[in-house]
Amino acid sequence: QSALTQPASVSGSPGQSITISCTGTSSDVGGYDYVSWYQQYPGKAPRLMIYDVNSRPSGVSNRFSGSRSGNTASLTISGLQAEDEADYYCCSYTSSSPSLFGTGTKVTVL
Amino acid sequence: EVHLVESGGGLVRAGGSLRLSCAASGFTFSTYSMNWVRQAPGKGLEWVSSVSRSSDYIYYASSMKGRFTISRDNAKNSLYLQMNSLRAEDTAVYYCARDRGGIVGATYAFDIWGQGTMVTVSS
């Protein structure tokens, strides 16, 4: 099963908003409310940022928000900060497998 | 504090076997589904396998099915991954990760991760 599709890189200036897309199908992203997003710094374990498409765990800044339209989920980071520079991965439940990750997106703060 | 600590990684020849362990602490291990996720050097995350709270439901990614076996011992607060017939493409950091659902059931979101253990398969 192929990974969900994310842009390889997204960049923005401090204070701006950026959006990372995660494209799948009706058998995964579009069919279930189990879409999550993870932040990962180099050499570190991933951190859960969004679950159930648009819910935020306690401790995660409200600058991070999730949404979905059709078969594409999105992670928006508003008020971009230097500390947001990291890799981001989406993940979805699928009809054939409990979890499928996206290809990953490197966020660069200019 | 909630912790997951993996161990058992190392260097193994292609065709060999390795058993990874994940020790949990700071939470009621038996009430959470658990997962293994791996990351090849310089690559993205790949879900490997999951096991439900009482081991009633076990799932594998297609490329690992038949070669990897996930198990857990709730009395020892431990998760395991037995890896057989290892291939060079199995080289990766292996993370254990907790499903955030707890007694609600699996939610397919991973809220606690270990630091990972490196597995290197030489060809």
Image: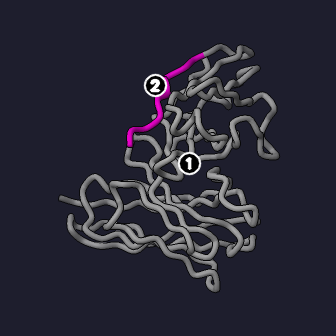
Range of residues picked out in magenta: A1-11
Report crowding for label 1: few under 14, some 14 to 19, many 20 or more residues within 10 A (C-alpha): few
Q: To which residue does mark 2 refer? A: A8
Q: In this rendering, is residue A32 above or below B117?
A: above
The span from disc 1 to disc 2 (Cα, nearest Å) is 19 Å
Seen in the picture, residue B113 relative to A40 is either above or below; the reply is: below
Q: Quadrant of residue A15?
A: top right
**Quadrant housing the N terminus of chain B:** bottom right
- Residue B45 in picture, x, y percent from top left: 47, 45
Instruction: Looking at the image, tell me whether mark 1 or mark 2 is earlier in sequence order.
Output: 2
Q: Position of residue A80 (x, y in %)?
A: 71, 21
Residue A9 inside the magenta-drawn segment:
yes
Q: Amino acid at mark 1?
A: Lys
- On screen, residue A1 versus residue A51, left or right, reads left
Is A104 magenta? The answer is: no
- The residue at the point 70 percent across, 42 percent down is A52
Q: Which residue sits at x=63%, y=78%? A: B77
Crowdedness near tag 2: few (<14), some (14–19) or many (≥20) residues, C-alpha within 10 Å: few
